[in-house]
Image (cartoon, rainbow, N blue to C red):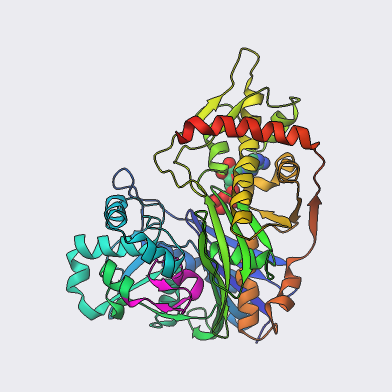
Amino acid sequence: MGDYLLVIDAGTTSTRAMLFAPGGACLDTEQRDVVQHYPAPGLVEHDAEEIRDSSLACARAVAARAGGAGRIAAIGITNQRETIVFWSRRTGRALAPAIVWQDRRTADMCGAWKATGHEPLVQGRTGLLLDPYFSASKIAWALEHWPELREAGDDLAVGTVESWLVYCLTGGLHITDATNASRTALMDIGAGRWDHDLLGLFGVPAYALPEIVDCAGAFGETRLFGAPIPISGMAGDQQAAAIGQACLAPGDTKATYGTGAFVLAHTGAQKPISHHRLLSTIAWQLGGRRAYALEGSVFVAGSLIKWLRDDLGLLTSASESEALARSVADNGGVYLVPALAGLGAPHWRPEARAAISGLSFASGRAHIVRAALEAMAYQTHDLMTAFAADGAGWERLKVDGGMVANDWLAQDLADMLDLDVERPHFVETTALGAAMLAGVGCGLFASLEEAAAMRGAVERFEPAMPPDLRQARLGGWAKALRPVLA
Ligand code: ADP
């Protein structure tokens, strides 16, 4: 057996395979884009067989360059969460399009369940809210509108993307890991099993669902790349990133700034209950024991910079935002509330729309760009306040994602949060977390703590802003936010 770890990272916009050495070095990557299907406004679908084919092709290429399957100790899988796949157990073929996490087709259904008082049940058992984001309402919609799924009877298999990939890789194993299961809104996250009442509420047949398993272990093996390779690690992308950031003890918190921003704070072995509209979720499950996290999702982060670049033409590249922010002494009184797709945690206001305020003839594009970057720290500050109110205060923040390549942004986070901000040199923490889990699952490491050595060196940004300036900026943000929430 070799000692490389092969990770399949099936993301929303691309699928990748990456090869890791047990010391943490990333040795090779192969990537394919995922086609986004938008059949109507608010609808987002993927072709599950395309995800399968791309994942297998990437993994095959990386395995071949590594010297063959025999050089690989284990496979770890991480994936876009909540996206749901429907397939036939008999043929292994997809029976319908995959409904993607961003899809809003079930907004009315969720609204109706909310109006009939079902949110406390959902929140109490699953830690989630009644929102189209999560898988359960998507499954309910599909069973109602796609007769072929009903007609399939007990030939129907349903699962999130890691579950689908394991089925394809092993030729028939139907499992899901606890982190992915915890995002379906069908799991009792305290008990660690599918919840009978929720299956009834959403009309999901238990026979279609996978078995919930740990995040690391000897799940099965694939023979698709030559010699058999064990599949031994699985986690949803944000949980994998938290593991890759070594958020292993209560209080450890990470924030990923990609298209959106996702904050996860490890809260320990007790299921947390949020009173401030954060989500409770499973951080990982090992040996049948669960660790939990509180999660806050901000819908617009890097996509704001992309919008300034591609739609407003204020930037030629995302990285130009850093030089522009530095080119002015301050924001010149300009604030940008990035509610372009509504506001996520802690507000959960899908109907809210963005605003740029405080403009004058003295305002230039640098002020607007700076205001856009500053909005990341403000949104994170609002989350930090909600986490603290839920008893999950942050001691420091571990950051990753495409946006934190921006040093100005990383320093602004430290200044505005008044916290040390830690950025690892290797920022692909999602894939790294899946590699760590695979390493634990195949016995290369005795524990996640031991695997955490894979994370490597980090860079620190320390707060250096006078408190009155911080207060003034937070005051400006609160004033800008008010009309957006009104
Ligand atoms: P995802 O994984 O969600 O696709 P990434 O983690 O790759 O996203 O991050 C890409 C996002 O980060 C893009 O939306 C881009 O606008 C933003 N971005 C990339 N580089 C910078 C930068 N130097 N400054 C600010 N934003 C950046």
Is 156 on the left or on the right of 232, as rendered? Answer: left
Position of residue 90 relative to residue 16, above or below, is below
Residue 82, percent from left and from top = 42, 62
Residue 26, percent from left and from top = 69, 65
For the C terminus, the image quarter is top left
Is 41 on the left or on the right of 179, as rendered? Answer: left
Ligand 1 shows up in the quarter that is: top right
Position of residue 158 relative to residue 265, above or below, is below
Residue 465, percent from left and from top = 80, 38
Q: In this view of the protein, can residue 49 be seen by the observer? A: no
Residue 392, percent from left and from top = 64, 60
For the N terminus, the image quarter is bottom right
Q: Tell me what residue is drawn at x 66 percent, y 14 percent.
A: 362
**Which residue appears farthest toward the top when viewing the image?**
361
Q: How many marks?
A: 0
Q: Using the image as rendered, state which of residue 112 and residue 317 is in the foreground.
A: 112
Q: Using the image as rendered, state which of residue 149 and residue 373 is in the foreground.
A: 373
Segment colored magenta: 176-196
Q: Tell me what residue is drawn at x 51 percent, y 66 percent.
A: 281
Residue 209 within the segment the image draws in magenta = no
Residue 374 placement: quadrant: top right
Q: Using the image as rendered, state which of residue 228 and residue 405 is in the foreground.
A: 405
Q: Using the image as rendered, state which of residue 13 and residue 292 is in the foreground.
A: 292
Q: In this view of the protein, can residue 42 be seen by the observer? A: yes
Is 420 on the left or on the right of 353, as rendered? Answer: right
Position of residue 298 relative to residue 170, above or below, is above
Is 250 on the left or on the right of 39, as rendered? Answer: right
Residue 186 within the segment the image draws in magenta = yes
